[in-house]
Each structure stands twice: as C-alpha cells, then as structure tokens.
Image (cartoon, grey):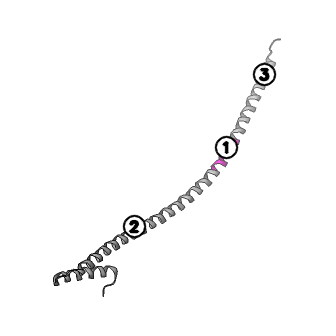
Amino acid sequence: MRYTATMTKMTIEKLAEITIKGFFEVGERFNQVDTRLDKMDGRLDKMDGRLDSMDGRLDKMDDRFARVEARLDMIETDLADLRSLHREVREIRSLLNEVVTQSQFNKLEKRLARVEQHLGMSK
C-alpha cells in the first residue's frame, strides 16, 4: 500500500488532534493539582493559626512559670534570712546566760534591736 498525500494529511491531522487532546488532559491535571495545592495551603494556614495560638499560650505559661520561680526565690531568700535571724537569737540567748559587762550588754541590746527591727517587732 502506498502512502498518498491524503493519507499523510489524515495522519498529521490525527496526530495534531491527539497532541491537542493530550495538552488539554495535561492542563486539566495541572488544574486538579492546583486545586489540591490550594486546599493544602488553606489547611496549612489553619495550622499556622493554631500554632500561633499555641505559641501565645506557651508564652503565657512561660510568664507564669517565671513569676512562680521569682516568688520561690523570694521565699528561699526569706527562709535564709529567718535562719540567719534564728542563729542570731540563739547566740544572743547563750550570751545572755553568761555574765556580761555593761558594754557587752549594750552590744547585745543593739543586735537584738536589729533582729526585732528586721522582724517588724521594733518599738
């Protein structure tokens, strides 16, 4: 069988139709992929919003923990001060049990006044 100009023309037209159809199918698939990607972008935007909200909550928790930690540091300092005052009071008591001179008594009285002032018991 011989190829004629008509057969060649039909073959080229058919090839062109198949090529055009292929491009349209590829275009449709790209559109479907674009739609899926748009949906994914929307989901990712929602996730970003949730993560931002979570960051805000975590920042608030960090602030609360920092405040609690600062309060615990203050309590620890207060306890150390009270221990120091307790030692001071014990020492003053033991010194008062001994025979003291007037100058020693005056020094002890000053120390006791300082302890009372620190405890808020001063007159």
Type of amino acid under label 1: Asp
User: Is residue 16 part of the magenta span, yes or no?
Assistant: no
> Position of 25 compared to 40: left or right?
right
Q: Earlier in the sequence, mark 1 or mark 3?
A: 3
Instruction: Pick whichever, 38 or 114, lies toward us.
Output: 114
Seen in the picture, residue 65 relative to 35 is either above or below; the reply is: below
Q: Which mark is residue 34?
A: 1
Residue 11: percent from left, percent from top: 78, 22
Residue 117: percent from left, percent from top: 30, 81
Q: In the displayed image of the protein, which residue is found farthest to the right?
A: 1
Q: Earlier in the sequence, mark 1 or mark 2?
A: 1
Q: Nearer the viewer, mark 1 or mark 3?
A: 1
Instruction: Pick whichever, 122 or 14, lies toward us.
Output: 122
Q: Which mark is residue 11?
A: 3
Q: State the SS at label 2.
A: helix
* Pointer 2 residue: 73
Residue 74: percent from left, percent from top: 39, 70
Q: Nearer the viewer, mark 1 or mark 2?
A: 2
> Position of 70 compared to 112: left or right?
right
